[in-house]
Structure formats: C-alpha cells, structure tokens
Amino acid sequence: MKQFLTNIFIALIICFETAAYSQSNAQPARQWNAEWIAAPNMTGNEYGIYYFRKSIEFNAKPSAFTVYVSADNRYKLYVNGVLVSLGPARGDSYSWNYETVDLAPYLTAGKNSIAALVWNEAEYRPEAQISFRTGFVLQGSSASEEVLNTNGSWKCKRDIGYQPIPGYFFAASKGQFVDMNLTVKDNWEAKDFDDTAWPQANKIADGRPKGMAWGLDWALVPSILPAREMTYQRIAKLRTEVGVKLPANFPARKTAVTIPANTTASFLLDNEVLTNAYVTFNFSGGKDAGISLAYAETLYDKGTNGTRKSNRNNVEGKEFIGRKDSLISAGTTGQSFTTLNFRTYRYLKIYVKTKNEPLVIDDIYGTFTGYPFNQEAVFNSNDKEISQILDIGWRTARLNAWETYTDCPYYEQLQYIGDTRIQAMISYYNTHDDLLARNALTQIDHSRLPEGVTKSCFPTKGTQIIPPFSLWYICMLHDYWMYRGGDDFIKDKLVGARGILDFFSKYQQADGSLKGTPYWTFVDWAGNLGGGLAGSDGSAAIYDLQLLWAYQVAAEMEAKLGMQDYATLYGQKAAQLKATIERKYWNASKRLYADTVEKTGYSQHVNALAILTGLVSEANMNDVANGMLNDKNLTQCTVYFKYYLNQALVKAGRGDDYNKWLGIWRENIAMGLTTWAEDSSLQTVRSECHAWGSSPNIEFYRTVLGIDSDAPGFAKVKVAPHLGILTKVSGSIPHPEGKVAVAYSLEGKKWKVSISLPAKTSGTFIWKGKTYPLKPGDNAMEL
C-alpha cells in the first residue's frame, strides 16, 4: 500500500465532522432492492478480511447522495480513497443497525470508486459482537441512488494476508497477524485501482428493513447514534529503548527511524494517559522483518507474573504484558497498517527483528475514537484536586462510551447494566446528549429472556444472567424518566419491567423475602457480595432491598404512565417487603441492618439501600449513618457501590462531608492512574478503566452544587447545596430546556447565592433546613 494511506485516517478526522452522518435516521418507508453480498466460495462463518468495490461515473458532482450501509461483522466504507463511515453500530439480529451516510461531499464529476473493507472475526470476534455470517449491504435512499445498490455488479476479494492472534483472555477484539507479502496492495480503495481481475460478489440474501419480510437473518433498523469521534493523536513519549538508539522527539513528532539489518530491537512508548485509538504504523523496506505492536493499560511489577501493579507512571522494575498485533514486512516502500478495531493502551511496546534489510519506521500514531459526547457541565472552584478528579472521571466515562456503554475498553467492552446505570447518569449531568442512554435502555429491553429476566449485559453472543442487574435496569428507566422525560419511550419499556418483576415474584416467599434466586446474584466486588449470600432461611437483605427499590420506582412509573392496577400491586408488594426487611434484618442494639436473618454480618451496602428506599426512620438515621462511616467491621463498598453509599449519606444529612469520602479516588491518583480502576484493590485490580467509578462527575453537581431533578423530565428543579469547606464555587449542568447554573460566595458572614433556571422551569432552594421558591430565569439572594 502506498504512503497516502496515512492520510486516510487524518482525513477521517475532518470528514466525520461533516454531513456524512447528519441524515435523518427515519426508517425508509419503501422496500429495499439491495442484496446482501459476500465473497464467492465462502461459507461466511470463517475468519476473513474482504474488500468490496464498485465504480460509478457522474456527469456532475451530486449535491446529495444518501445511502444506507451495514455489514456483518463490521465495515469501513471509502469513497475515492477517503474513509467516510465505520459500522455498523453493534446491535442484535432482531435489530441490526445500518448507518445513514451522505456520500456527496466525497464524490466528483467523472469516475468514482465506492469501496468497503468488511471483516468477520468468526469465533475470535468480541463477546459483544452478534453475528449471522459475513455479509455487506448498501442501499440507495432513492431511486436515483439505487445505482450503488449491492448486487452482482460489485466486486469482492478476500485478503489472505490476515490471521487472528487469540492471545490470553479478552472478551474484546483479538489481535491481528498480517503478512504484508500476501495482502492486497496498490490502494485497493482508490478510484484508479484496477479491479478487473476481481471476482463478482455473490448474493446471499435480500436486503430488507425490519418488518418488511416474513423472516430475516438481519432485521435492519436505522442506528440512532451519531458517528463516533475520530481525532488524530500523537503518542506522547519514548520511555525505554533496547537494541537501537531513537531520536529524542520520537514518537511525539513524526520522525523516521531506521532499524538496521540483522537487528533485534524494542522500545516502550508512553501515551501518558489511557486512550482508545486506531493505531497506524507506517514503514518501508525491511523485507521479511518481524514487527509486533503490543498494548497495555499499565506495566506489572517484575517477577509477579502479571499479578501485581505499583505506581503506573514508573517503568523501572516493571515488565510488559499485553495484547499484540504482528506484521511481516514485504520490503516495499510506503507500507501501512491500521488496526481493524481500536486498541486501548497507555503503554505501547514495539518489537522489531530485521533480516538482511534495514526497516524504516516512517510514523506511528493513534486516532482516538469514542462516542462524540461534548462535556457541557461546568464546576468552578479554586480546588485543583476537584478539577483533577473531574478530568479523570470524564476521561474514564468517555473511554467507556463508544457504540454502547462498556464496562471496560481493554478487556471486555460489554454493556453491563450495573455499570451502565451510573454511566447514563454521568451523561445526563454532563451533556444534553441522551441517545446512548436511550440506545442502552432499548438494547437491554431486547435482551429479556422468556423467563422475564434480562441478560446481565447486552449486546452479547452469550447468555450471562445477573438478576440484581435486571432490578437496576428498572431503576435506570426511572432515572431516564426523571432526568430526561420521554413518557412514551418509558411507557413502551414498562412491559419489560413487568416481566422482570414477575420473574422475581416467583422467588418471593410468603413474607415477600427472596429465596433461591437463580443465576449469579452479584452485588459488588466486596466481601461475600459477589453472589450467593444467603441466611439460614435462604434470604438476604441486599436482594430484598434491591427488589424493594424496583417495586417502588415501578409503582411510581405505572401510576403516571402505565396501569393503575400494577401501581397498586407493586405498592402492596413494596409495603410488605419494607415490613419484612425491618422485622428480619434490623438489629436494635447495634442500630444497623444485618446482611442476613442471623444478624452476624453487616455491610455498608445493605444500610445504604435501607436509607435510599426510605426504610430508615428519622430517629435511626443518625445511628445508621455513623455505623456506615465508622464501623470498619462492616463490609466496605468498593468504588462502584460508593455511588449508592454516598447518596445514602447525603440523604442522612452528611452531604457537607462529601469531600472527605473521596479516599479511593485520591489513592487512584497517587498510584498514577489516569482513569478509575475497576475496584478498590489497586495493586491487584484487573481493569484500569471502569466508568462505574466516575460517580464524582455526578455528585460534584448533584451533591456539592446541589442541582437535582424534582419531577419527571426535570420539570422542576431542586437545589440543595452541600459546600463543606468551599466558600466560593459555581457551576452549571445541562437541562432538557437549557441549563441550570448556580453560584455561591461567602462574603463576610453572608452568602450570596445566584441560581438560574430555564425559562419555563421553576424549583426550590433548600438552605440550612429552610425552603425558598425559585422562579424561572435568574434568582439572587443573600443569606
């Protein structure tokens, strides 16, 4: 491949900001005429990389040329050598996404080429990748654009130079081995490429939108998501080098590096922060040289066999363990490799072993990718630590938002409900964009099994069930309703919520308490809450409390949006559960709720949920809060469940101490992490990037600034700040009707307070136990 391939990803940075993805995602009203096509003589179930091409001529440059495009597993679409679309956004066969793309900006008068790279990782595909078989489809949006429809006029060729590198455990995508001697060369996606020797593509199925055929392997639906961000990103610095001397400005600046013939060399690069990026490696010469690009979130302490970590900024006394891609050089000039899928890394290690020719590394860089969130929330104070925590939290949230929310970008890339509830709330508090949250709620609804329970994560090619996560899904629906509204959207999902609660009702005993709930009853990576906690009667408070909360919010939604009979039923079940939990688990002498009926174990988790579900009386609130804060014999929440713990402490009247509860986040920073780790065991933690730890990006706005929804759709605003030691602080968050902005300043002995609400939104301000009305627009007071 020639050197100009380097420019394709740079051009992508620009083109993804254009109208290529700005078209309406409305479902086409007419039947499609395109065909699903594939390479001839292939079953479609094997690992393979395929190139599709079609040439077309125009008398004049089109002003608009919209097409719908999809593939199985994935595609990259090019017009005249420029990458214009990646997809499809992950879904399931019942709702297989297609992207809507206007090709006009990239078309010219005269000859044009439309080309697609399609790949199927087969048994090596990511856990989140559902698949039927290899296929590609492109449909014009009108009769004039159907000239590009996929059919026998398209050419297709398989690239035999690619093989998978399975490596160690990854639910995410695997590595690639590419022999450049065998790959398709000469800019196969360019308009002047000669494809006359390529075979015609084979039809494998009719292209049909969902609902327009009696049976489909891919029920095509328009993706509701915008194009993912693509931003050119240099790798920050060189940390170590072995077997070769490299320039000081490599790789931060584009600098050619020569590895001599018959040399074994390696060097360690540091991006300084974790990132998700398509890695591009450009090189020349070095016939049959072996090259490996390896990626790691961090380095491990030497001699621990990948089991222990220390400060993430240090490289001395460390060893590199990570996934990799490998190449064999063809010896030509202008060779270029770009990963099919993005790679997650802070550290990138390059290994090179040359033979009889020197290898020239022309360049190496990344192209950052992620859901195109624009952070709109603002928090102003003179506390630099708060800014650092918010910056790291936002980076963590962004690295776990792509075509779905993900639990972690490096290992799994799975949309787990427990993670996603918190991630969606971060989205509501930081941006107006709620499409990824809507997408998640719809996909999780699609995952429901005949029993009524959802899968623990979705999309996924497997079936893992964490029943408590299905209860969090019901709470997720309530979150969306409160912070974004969407009555019709939520009403549509209530059928699924009823199925979930029906599933749990089968495992309720006569007193309402759960017993014998099947599958993996995970709560948190803490103590015995990883699943299977139960007392002698088979029940446990943590499960009963999660069910109670789900009944409560479901009753509220049913009363306003659904059926009153369900609201009444769920209200009765909630009342029964509250009485049962109080009777079975409250320890009057210890002033805490126990984990089980034996009252031998206690946790922050149970007592936090007891507060949040309204179980704890005002008379007992102070004692329960003191116990959660001071009794270290309680099972402690990890960084994930602190989302619930801290909300409970705020409800218990301790919100002014929020800044004192950030110990685990400070430990992450002290250990050199640039994203929040999966759990609180920072020396042995697996994932370095779990957005369920980014709850401060909610609470600095909800708790400290005090901004919260006080009615469905944020129709009313409640402002109840908890400033602690802060004496001058301001900020704002997005609101469905605009934004909510607040400012607090202590001047002498008086607080000056300024609160701005959207034009048609009223609210209340709570200060030192007193409630003040807030009118739409600007409110100012001195207290």
Image: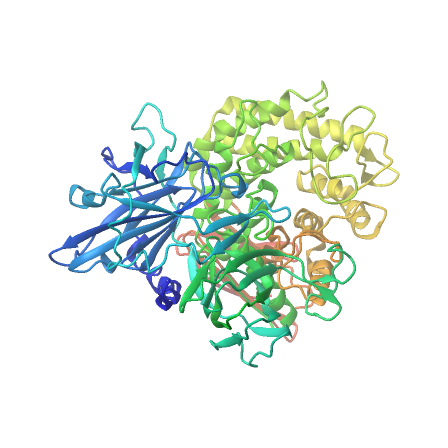
Percent x, y of residue 182: 43, 54
For residue 92, above or below residue 49: above
Q: Quadrant of the N terminus?
A: bottom left
The picture places residue 315, in percent across and down from the top left corner, at 70, 70
Q: How is the image coloured?
A: rainbow
Does 520 appear above or below 741? above
Q: Is residue 743 visible?
A: no
Q: Position of residue 676 (x, y in %)?
A: 64, 58
**Residue at the spot x=31%, y=56% of the render?**
189
Occupied quadrant, residue 751? bottom right
Q: Along the horizontal axis of the image, is 65 left or right of 85?
A: left
Question: Which residue is depicted at the point 88% across and 38% down?
Answer: 589
Q: Is residue 408 left or right of residue 630?
A: left
Residue 746: x and y in percent read 62, 72
Vertical order, 98 against 516 (above or below): below
Residue shown at 57% from the left, 35% from the top? 553
Location of the C terminus (image quadrant): bottom right
On screen, residue 508 versus residue 349, left or right, reads right
* Residue 480 horizontal side relative to residue 519, left or right: left
The count of marks equals 0
Question: From this viewpoint, is residue 557 visible?
Answer: yes
Q: Quadrant of residue 193?
A: bottom left
Kindly give the residue lying farthest to the top in the view shown: 510
